[in-house]
Amino acid sequence: MNYSIALVPGDGIGPEVCSKAVEALETAGDKYGHIFNFVELEAGGCAIDSTGEPLPAATLDAARQCDALLLGAVGGPKWETLHGDKRPERALLGLRAGLGVFANLRPASLLPQLKDACPLKDEVLIASNEQGKATFDLLIVRELTGGIYFGERGRDGDGKAPDGSAYDTERYNRAEIERVLRVGYDAARKRRKKLTLVDKANVLESSRFWREITQEMAVGYKDIETNYLYVDNCAMQLVRAPGQFDVVVTSNLFGDILSDEASVISGSIGMLASASIGEIPTGHKYPAGMYEPIHGSAPDIAGRDLANPLAAILSAAMMLRYSFGLLKEAAAIEAAVTKVLDSGLRTKDIASRVKTGANEKIVGTKEMAAAVIKALENE
């Protein structure tokens, strides 16, 4: 089979980790008889430098013609003083809206090889795990194309004057909430059949709307245990009892924050992949999607062979699974990553916080990726 993939390396460490994900995809293609055609596109800070726009129209048009999109990272201090609509991060919002990907799937689990990199004590992990194990495995389903990131915004008056003000508006309609909840409930059916809605219904009218719709939809998912948590309580529960969670569904803003918190207790933000998916187009079996590591551009380590490529490589595996239906190929990439971690190789961000006597060896971006490729070839 032939697949076309829009490739947006972006800024900072984006090009470094994206290139390693491409190598993993090409290796899987060679091994299993697939051809991946990559269309490299500009978005983010690099696009601002060359075109003046964070998301050139040509980039979005080309991305829409591809089967899926793989992104590295965008942003950096070089562009922080630009107006909000001209900042690199607007490229992410534009791609998500333009591609119609409304549900962001961010799995967070504690791999046994990285337990010593987790900041939580074993007794904390064990206390909330149904099997009494020092681990957790959760999926955050974040609404991606609505809410405060896409709402009306602006400034009134002179920002320096005492009466100057700025505002951002949180707004959701029923269809936006229902479709992301369906993704969450469908995911819960394939996992441990528990769904937690995270909101701020004690304060926000938009959150009360989320909760009302969830209560309505829960009637049609009686096989799923539905729970509700305020976002501040959820943030606390993630660090005191993460094993209680299975699928967490929440708004754009809350999901952005909570998934970053979940990445830290997983050992490192450099390990977390993500998939952003939309509706399944007519005549297709799988949705188009946008895939990216959640670690950001990390400009302070860009070009220094320090970035962890595993989140990008695992994002490529998610692409194979969700957009192409290549389950065997996705599992092979994930198994290769596991094998390399079992061997003791670590980038600096996932090295143990304490000396454990394990045979850990700290390596750079290139060596870590090369080890994954070798393991994939031999898988």
Image (spheres, rainbow, N blue to C red):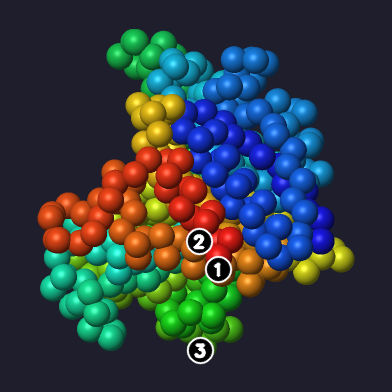
From the image, which quarter does the C terminus lie in? Answer: bottom right
- Tell me what residue is drawn at x 28 percent, y 51 percent: 361
- Label disc, if present, on residue 379 of the rendered structure: 1
- Tell me what residue is drawn at x 48 percent, y 48 percent: 369
Q: Are marks 1 and 2 in contact (CB under 8 Å)?
A: yes
> Does the rendering let one see residue 235?
no
Is 149 in front, or is 309?
309
Residue 301 in percent (x, y) is at 36, 30
> Does the rendering let one see residue 223?
yes
Looking at the image, tell me whether mark 3 or mark 1 is earlier in sequence order: 3
Element under label 3? Answer: loop
Mark 3 is surrounded, within 10 Å at the Cα level, by few (under 14), some (14 to 19) or many (20 or more) other residues, namely few
Residue 23 in percent (x, y) is at 60, 47
- Tell me what residue is drawn at x 81 percent, y 56 percent: 2
Mark 2 is surrounded, within 10 Å at the Cα level, by few (under 14), some (14 to 19) or many (20 or more) other residues, namely some
| Extreme residue in the bottom direction | 223
Q: Are marks 3 and 1 in contact (CB under 8 Å)?
A: no
- Label disc, if present, on residue 223 of the rendered structure: 3
Q: Is the residue 349 above or below the residue 235 in the image?
A: above
